[in-house]
């Protein structure tokens, strides 16, 4: 077995053990992830544990072409770089055009890849949604990928620290919403298109979150429409 594959299995086993011992994880709607076409899984980002849950989800781990992008800052740690390379995540520069990483993601995504991405690009300081970047919309519009919105609660850094210090298990919920698509990236008015598409993605995440988590999208007209249509959490 290749060394990289062994490392991936080893790291995933450690993460699964951690979540089994220290958390109660409830996942709903994960069957909406398809394996025969490109998929962009978009999630809110409220804590360090968000990214660590991804490899432990069987539907994601067992996918034969998983794509997870992660901030370039984690390259600075030798341990994190080894772990991230072992998991085959892709480092990306969040602040400058990263042509190499973008081309690699597009190539893998077009090959029926499953991409997991946090559109906000960084962790929210208070668990509420912050203004998202347009990367997820760009990748979906360039590849025709289906977008699956995902909402997570219970992984906020402050809450995780508080619970673990008091020896209480974490209560983590992960909810996948209805898949949808956006049109192909147009030749004109690209910035406006990507901003509107990003708002659509974020409002579909926000509708599955408690009101206190909706942040800058709480008053968005599109969120009000989705709530009126009964798209909120059960």
Image (tube, rainbow, N blue to C red):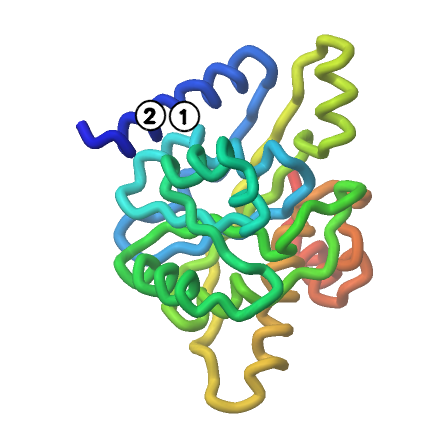
Q: Is residue 160 above or below residue 67?
A: above
Q: Circle 1: is it few (<14), some (14-19), or many (20+) Cα within 10 Å?
A: many
Could you tell me how far apart the alpha carbons at marks 2 and 1 are, in whole angstroms? Answer: 5 Å
Residue drawn at point x = 48 percent, y = 66 percent = 98
Residue in the picture at 63% in, 35% down: 48
Relative to 96, residue 42 above or below = above
Q: Where is 43 relative to 60, above or below?
A: below
Provide the secondary structure element on which disc 1 rests: helix
Q: What quarter of the picture does the C terminus occupy?
A: top right
Q: Position of residue 28 (x, y in %)?
A: 51, 34
Q: Quadrant of residue 142?
A: bottom left
* Residue 149 appears in view: no
Residue 190 or 181: which is nearer the viewer? 190
* Residue 118, position as x, y percentages in the image: 57, 51
The label on residue 12 is: 1
Left or right of residue 97: residue 120 = right
- In the figure, is residue 130 to the left or right of 7? right
For this view, does 71 lie left or right of residue 146?
A: right
Outermost residue on the left side: it is: 1
For mark 2, give the secondary structure. helix
Query: Residue 9: which numbered mark, if any?
Result: 2
Percent x, y of residue 18: 53, 17
* Label 2 Cα neighbours within 10 Å, binned few <14 / some 14-19 / many ≥20: some
Percent coordinates x, y for residue 82 in the rendering: 42, 35
Seen at 35% across and 46% down, the residue is 66
Quarter that holds the N terminus? top left
Q: Which residue is farthest bottom?
A: 188
């Amino acid at each position: 077995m290749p060394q990289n594959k062994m490392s991936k299995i080893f790291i995933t086993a450690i993460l699964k053990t951690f979540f089994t011992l220290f958390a109660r994880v409830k996942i709903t709607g994960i069957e909406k992830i398809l394996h025969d076409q490109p998929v962009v899984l978009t999630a809110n980002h409220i804590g360090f544990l968000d990214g660590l849950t991804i490899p432990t989800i069987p539907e994601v781990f067992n996918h034969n072409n998983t794509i997870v992008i992660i901030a370039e800052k984690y390259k600075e740690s030798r341990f994190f770089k080894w772990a991230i390379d072992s998991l085959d995540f892709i480092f990306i520069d969040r602040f400058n055009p990263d042509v190499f990483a973008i081309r690699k993601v597009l190539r893998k995504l077009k090959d029926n890849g499953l991409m997991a991405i946090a559109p906000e690009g960084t962790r929210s300081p208070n668990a509420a949604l912050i203004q998202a970047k347009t990367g997820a919309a760009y990748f979906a519009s360039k590849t025709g990928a289906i977008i699956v919105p995902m909402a997570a609660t219970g992984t906020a850094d402050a809450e995780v620290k508080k619970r673990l210090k008091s020896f209480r298990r974490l209560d983590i919920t992960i909810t996948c919403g209805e898949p949808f698509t956006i049109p192909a990236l147009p030749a004109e008015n690209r910035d406006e298109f990507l901003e509107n598409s990003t708002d659509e993605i974020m409002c579909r995440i926000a509708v599955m979150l408690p009101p206190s988590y909706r942040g800058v999208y709480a008053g968005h007209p599109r969120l009000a429409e989705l709530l009126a249509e009964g798209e909120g959490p059960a």
